[in-house]
Image (spheres, helix red, strand yellow):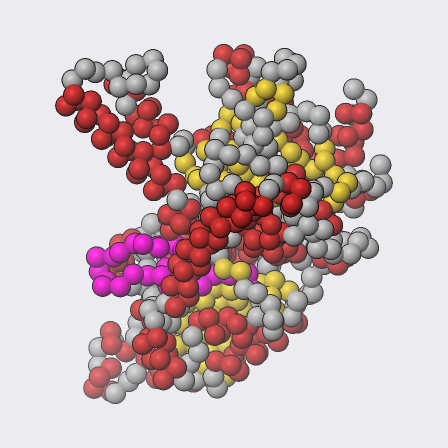
Amino acid sequence: MARTPLDRLGSPIDELMDAATRSANADKMAALDASLEEKLEQVRAGWGQKYLDRVHAKGKLSTWERAELLADPGSEIFPIGSLVNHGVQFSGSRRAAPGAGVLTAFVQVHGRWVIAVANDNTVASGSWWPKTPEKIQRAQEVALKLRLPVVYLVDCSGLFLPEQAASFPGRSGAGHIFKKNAELSANGVPQIAGVFGDCIAGGGYMPLISDRVYMTESAYMVIAGAALIQGAKSLKLTSLDIGGPEVHVGRSGCADVRVPDDASCIRLIREEVERLPSSAADFYRHGAEAMDPALDPGELSAIFPVDHRQTYAPREVIARLVDGSLFHEVMADRGREVIVGVARIQGLWVGLLMNNPQLTEHPDKPGEMRAGGILYRDGIAKLSAFSRACNDDGIPMFWLQDIAGFDIGAEAEAMGLLGYGSSLIYGISTHQTPMFTVLMRKASGAGYYAMAGHPYEPVLQLSTPITRQAVMEGRTLAIAAYNTKLDDNFEIATEDPEERAQIEAGMAQTAARIEADMDPVASASRMDTDEVIPLDALRRWLEVLTLASYQSIGHRRIKNPRIWSLHDLEALLRCR
């Protein structure tokens, strides 16, 4: 089969739900979005106006001003890890470290997507805090998997020393950044660095493996600053004298070009990116045109009930994410607890794998319905077969999670769900084509793993304001924790009022703690997810990730659609 037929999905929003339900869902989501936006604004503000004024007084731009100057005019910056360290207080500082003191983001430069890594010079002069190295490394991993150029905007005074024990020595400590620099270089990924100010110790090492290094007149790179060098005071030496552009551009050769100021540096970095090959995305469209969804992605906030116990129509979600709301569903009559198929985003082919939260009919027991959002045997096999076909064909995959876990019980064990699950895990552990995971709502138990959760190294994992990520719900976990104190109906098994009160209080505290842990902002703070985004922004994120997947050539298999393995799979299914 040389062509893949696409069918129109979706219905107008007013046919899906009444106005009251739509408004109630949208209002609840708007409140969550506003809370998220407030937190993101706090991160963007760094340590506030006072410290921004200090940066400007030195004749320098702030981190976000540099990033916006780097980006194509009118384009949107897509940060990664914005909420890392959110809510964390460090004993060595009176202030928090918003965003771990570094901006990492997808930025479009001359039509090409790059990964930018930019120290926040309003937060302890761009120091590396606990989790700063891990956040930088995470951005480098994304760049390596997609073979995207990396732009470092360096303004870093080294480790935040009062907290050095949490950022210096371990396997993911600060030194691992330089290993990632080397891996990127070894794999032919371009790296370009601009050095704008303090660049001490580890901060000095980070730019050096880059293919191009620019230094402003106010920048210096040193292993140790003047304050640590014996005799520096008597000789009236400054760090600029020891490692400024006069030294590193003029004599040592550790930098390539000397520039007068931040704006000039950014302009030249943009010119370097323009010299790189342009995106291959248009080639891989095979003549197709990029289209918006026929149905408004902004309606996702109304479609999703905030209450995780309520359901929704998953194909209506897909209809608001893909070009023209057109979708080719594969194996629609098998494993109906999951939906798999291909569509275009920005005119480029992607595979979608989504949990179905609705009730589905038991395949072997007509008339018997089964709970949605759970993986049964056929659904697991369906995910395995489809994802392997996508991997073979080079089709990037989006895993859209809303999962409560695996089926359990005697029937599940007799059907060999452990074996089918292991086959799926093997697949997602070894796929080479880009995989992206979106935790739409529930991300529970081993089902979170099976749907390409973070431990299986998707290129990126996104969460939404209604994501709930945990082994099990708070109430369920409390029951499990206090199981020996409960009867067969999970009621407290004691007649002693004092003991009953203690058990009730303990269960309530356990449930509340788990509920707090499940919060998507808490997950993002721990780096258990990469970014929390509003549902209304999901289509824009999928566009960026799809374009980034097809930008670079020669590093992974991308088959033309005429010879997809997916056609063979569907041909065999029709022969049944």
Residue sitting at x 62%, y 31% = 338
Up/down of 429 relative to 233, above or below: above
Residue farthest along the right direction in this orientation = 2
Up/down of 143 relative to 242, above or below: above
Q: Nearer the viewer, residue 447 or 34?
A: 34
Residue 476 makes an appearance in the image: yes
Residue sitting at x 50%, y 84% = 259
Residue 498: x, y in percent?
Answer: 14, 23
Main secondary-structure element of the magenta-colored stretch: loop
Q: Report whether 230 appears left or right of 238.
A: left
Residue 100 in magenta stretch: yes
Q: Report whether 324 appears left or right of 62.
A: right
Residue 454: x, y in percent?
Answer: 48, 42
**Which quadrant: the N terminus?**
top right
Residue 210 in magenta stretch: no
Q: Nearer the viewer, residue 467 or 119?
A: 467
Q: Which residues are magenta?
A: 81-107
Up/down of 484 relative to 401, above or below: above
Q: Nearer the viewer, residue 485 or 400?
A: 485
**Which quadrant: the C terminus?**
top right
Residue sitting at x 39%, y 41% = 518
Residue 65: x, y in percent?
Answer: 47, 74
